[in-house]
Each structure stands twice: as structure tokens, then as C-alpha cells.
Image: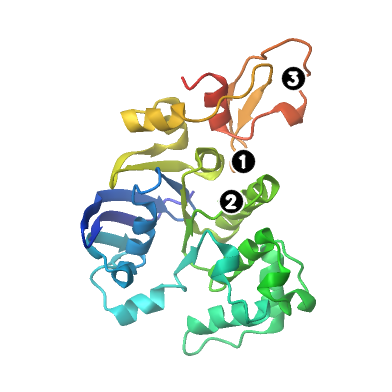
């Protein structure tokens, strides 16, 4: 994680008939850091994403406070300046990949349009070779036949990777990922998490990872903000959040994690991104090979689940 402050927020927002959807909601992201934003449905997570991008008005919302991106407060700049930042300096990945792509346009055309919509006046031309390199970067088939496909010819996982490719076409400094794994099967879900982690490291890109999935957040995020009823009630390192939760709501979220069935063994706990050992768990029964990697939990939250939420 870089030491350079990239984004910090202090936001209040609401909609007609629904005031206080966000109430002085504060978090911060450093360059190259992945920060999780966790909360139940209706807690204000997606409103936070729209507020950072100053898109809330298109849903009839109101917004005040501060969004500092680098040395600028995004709430004080003109809409023309904000349009230059959206899609270029700040990318967005949504949760419904198939619905987010234009069914009438080929994949290559959609990647090109994403580049064209946010290019600078003197940007060099975007070529097929650039598009193919972008496919390679998100672990898709890096060839022209793939670029000629339509969205209906893609799996959900492939479509999500295309959305990620479109979001990073201008190498943004910040990526907002709003529930990006909610529509994916378990294997693709894990692959996309690894992709976000790798892109953050390679591009030194900050990521705001918005999710209700505590296991995913614990796997790739270095810090976590807990959002409840529009307020960030806790913001700390991932380890502190899941080992020493300070707020009652955070403790309730952790208690809601399903426990593993009796007899399941987990020997060691490791975060995906850092490869950092976070704890030990005791086998539920004897006769199991401790070194079997198939039995190791993927992340810190599984240790919490195994220990009964303590």
C-alpha cells in the first residue's frame, strides 16, 4: 500500500422522502490500497459510490460534505471538470455485467467507446493491439475473435472481466467496484477477487470494494469501513475489524457468518493479497493431514467462523 492519500470522504446524502441515507460517512483510501465498504442491504453502500462520482443527482438525490480526491474537493469543481475525472481518473465496475453491456455492440466496439468517451484531446489513437493487451491484462482470450463477440456470447464471468477492462482502459488512480462478484459462481468469484488484487498492485490503483460479502472483503482488503444506517460506525484494518470489532453492529455482522460443519479442519489462515498468516485453527477431528492445502481456509473470516465468531 502506498502512503499517498488518494481519496477521503465526509458525506451526507438523501433522496426525496428519504433523508439521511448517508450521515457524515467518512473513509479514506491510499494509493494502491483496497478498502472494503461493508453493510447490509439499504445501508447506503451504492449511494456512497454514486456520491463519490457525483452522480446522485441523476437519481434525485442531494449531497453535501466533502470528497477529497488528491488535492481537490470533487464537490467544489464544475460538472465539466468532473466529467474529465469520471471514467479517466476514477473507474466504476457494477454488479450486473451482462445488463451493463450494450447487447447490440461487439466487445471491441464497447471497449473502444469506453476509451473514446474519456480520452484527452491529444491522446494517441486506440488500436486493436491496445484492446488485445487490455484483454490479456484481465485474463481474457487476447485475440480479435473475442473482440468481435457480442455480450450474449459471453459467460457472466467473461462479461465481468470485460467491464473491468473498460473501467481500467485509461489506467485510473481509483476504481470503485460496487458488488462486483454478487452474480458470479464460486470459482469465478475467487478469480475476480484475485484479479482485483493483482490490478491494484500492478497499477498502484486504489480500489473501493463495496460488498455485503464479508468473506470476499476479508480476502483482499487491507482496511474495512462498516456502514450502518448511513454512518461509518467502524473503520480499521481488516485484522482489527475481524479480530477485535469495537462496534455492536460489526460484531453482529461477524456473528452472521455461517459456521463450518463439524468435522471440517482448517490449519492455517492466510489473506489472498498479502500471503500473511493471520492465525491457527485446531482440527475438529484427528487423522487429517495438516499440510493439505485443500483444507486451508481462504481468508481471515473463515477463522472467525471456525472459532464460533469470537
**Res. 183 visible in picture:** yes
Which image quadrant is residue 78 in? bottom left
Furthest-top residue in this view? 286
Residue 271 image point, x, y percent: 59, 36
Considering the numbered disc 1 on the image, is that residue within a helix, a strand or a loop?
loop
> Which residue is depicted at the point 26% across and 65% down?
61
Dot 2 crowding, Cα within 10 Å, few <14, some 14–19, many 20+: many
Q: Which residue is mark 2?
A: 197
**Circles 1 and 2 in contact, beta carbons < 8 Å:** yes
172 left or right of 128 in image: left
15 left or right of 237 in image: left
**Circles 2 and 3 in contact, beta carbons < 8 Å:** no
**Res. 119 visible in picture:** no
Considering the numbered disc 2 on the image, is that residue within a helix, a strand or a loop?
helix
Residue 258 image point, x, y percent: 54, 29
- 277 w.r.t. 185: above or below: above
The CA distance from mark 2 to mark 3 is: 27 Å
Q: Which residue is mark 1?
A: 272
The CA distance from mark 3 to mark 1 is: 19 Å
Amino acid at each position: 500500500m502506498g502512503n499517498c492519500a488518494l481519496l477521503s470522504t465526509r458525506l451526507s446524502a438523501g433522496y426525496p422522502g428519504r433523508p439521511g441515507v448517508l450521515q457524515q460517512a467518512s473513509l479514506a483510501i491510499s494509493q494502491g490500497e483496497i478498502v472494503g465498504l461493508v453493510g447490509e442491504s439499504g445501508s447506503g453502500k451504492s449511494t456512497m459510490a454514486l456520491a463519490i462520482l457525483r452522480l446522485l443527482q441523476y437519481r434525485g438525490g442531494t449531497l453535501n460534505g466533502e470528497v477529497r480526491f488528491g488535492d481537490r474537493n470533487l464537490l467544489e469543481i464544475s460538472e465539466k471538470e468532473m466529467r474529465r475525472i469520471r471514467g479517466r481518473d476514477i473507474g466504476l465496475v457494477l454488479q450486473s455485467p451482462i445488463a451493463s453491456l450494450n447487447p447490440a455492440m461487439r466487445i471491441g466496439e464497447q471497449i473502444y467507446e469506453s476509451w473514446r468517451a474519456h480520452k484527452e484531446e491529444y491522446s494517441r489513437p486506440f488500436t486493436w493491439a491496445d484492446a488485445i493487451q487490455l484483454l490479456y491484462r484481465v485474463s481474457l482470450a487476447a485475440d480479435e475473435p473475442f473482440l468481435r463477440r457480442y455480450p450474449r456470447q459471453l459467460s457472466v464471468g467473461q462479461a465481468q472481466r470485460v467491464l473491468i477492462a473498460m473501467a481500467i482502459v485509461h489506467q485510473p488512480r481509483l476504481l470503485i467496484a460496487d458488488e462486483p462478484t454478487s452474480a458470479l459462481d464460486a470459482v469465478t468469484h475467487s478469480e475476480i477477487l484475485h484479479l482485483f488484487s493483482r490490478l491494484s498492485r500492478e497499477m498502484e490503483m486504489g480500489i473501493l470494494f463495496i460488498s455485503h460479502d464479508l468473506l470476499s472483503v476479508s480476502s483482499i482488503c487491507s482496511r474495512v469501513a462498516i456502514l450502518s444506517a448511513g454512518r461509518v460506525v467502524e473503520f480499521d484494518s481488516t485484522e482489527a475489524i475481524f479480530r477485535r470489532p469495537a462496534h455492536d453492529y460489526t460484531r453482529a455482522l461477524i456473528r452472521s457468518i455461517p459456521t463450518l460443519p463439524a468435522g471440517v479442519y482448517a490449519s492455517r489462515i492466510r489473506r489472498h493479497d498479502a500471503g500473511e498468516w493471520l492465525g491457527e485453527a485446531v482440527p475438529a477431528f484427528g487423522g487429517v493431514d495438516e499440510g493439505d492445502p485443500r483444507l486451508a481456509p481462504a481468508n481471515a473470516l473463515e477463522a472467525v467462523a471456525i472459532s464460533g465468531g469470537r
